[in-house]
Image: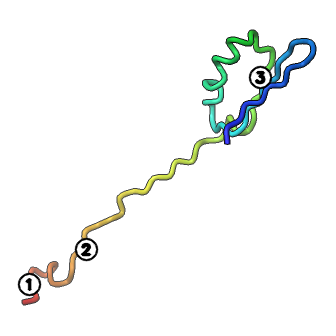
Amino acid sequence: METLEFIIYPDGRVEERVTGIIGSSCAEVTAAIEAKLGIVAHRELTSENFAQKQVTSQSDTQCDRVSDTEASGFSPW
């Protein structure tokens, strides 16, 4: 689950914590918010930033099945 948490301190500082976003897309998600908040004084990247998304795709492993009679060119009849 993607979450953005903001901690606002009495002195006006805002701490932003982002979890659940894998890879560097976190910067894209938070860019507009950070632009409105002002200057980013410190950025600490978590291990999620350096992780890579797991892409799972099923390759086309289906193949045409050839029976023995088709392979030999003879008809079963």
Residue at (92%, 12%) from the top-left corner? 11
Seen from the viewer's position, the closer of residues 68 and 35 is: 35
Report the quarter where the N terminus lies. Answer: top right
- Tell me the tag on residue 43: 3
- Tell me the tag on residue 31: none
Task: From the image, state whether disc 2 or disc 1 is nearer to you.
Answer: 2
Q: Is residue 31 above or below residue 59?
A: above
Task: Name the residue beneath numbered marker 2.
Answer: 65
Q: Residues within 10 Å of mark 1 (few under 14, many from 20)?
A: few
Q: Which residue type does callout 2 highlight?
A: Arg
Q: Position of residue 45 (x, y in %)?
A: 75, 30
C-alpha separation, residue under disc 3 versus residue under disc 2: 57 Å
Task: Name the residue beneath numbered marker 1.
Answer: 74
Name, please, the residue furthest toward the right: 10
C-alpha separation, residue under disc 2 versus residue under disc 1: 16 Å
Q: Position of residue 36 (x, y in %)?
A: 69, 11
Q: Position of residue 58 (x, y in %)?
A: 43, 57
- Could you say whether the residue bearing mark 2 is in a helix, strand or loop? loop
Left or right placement of residue 53 versus residue 67 in this view: right
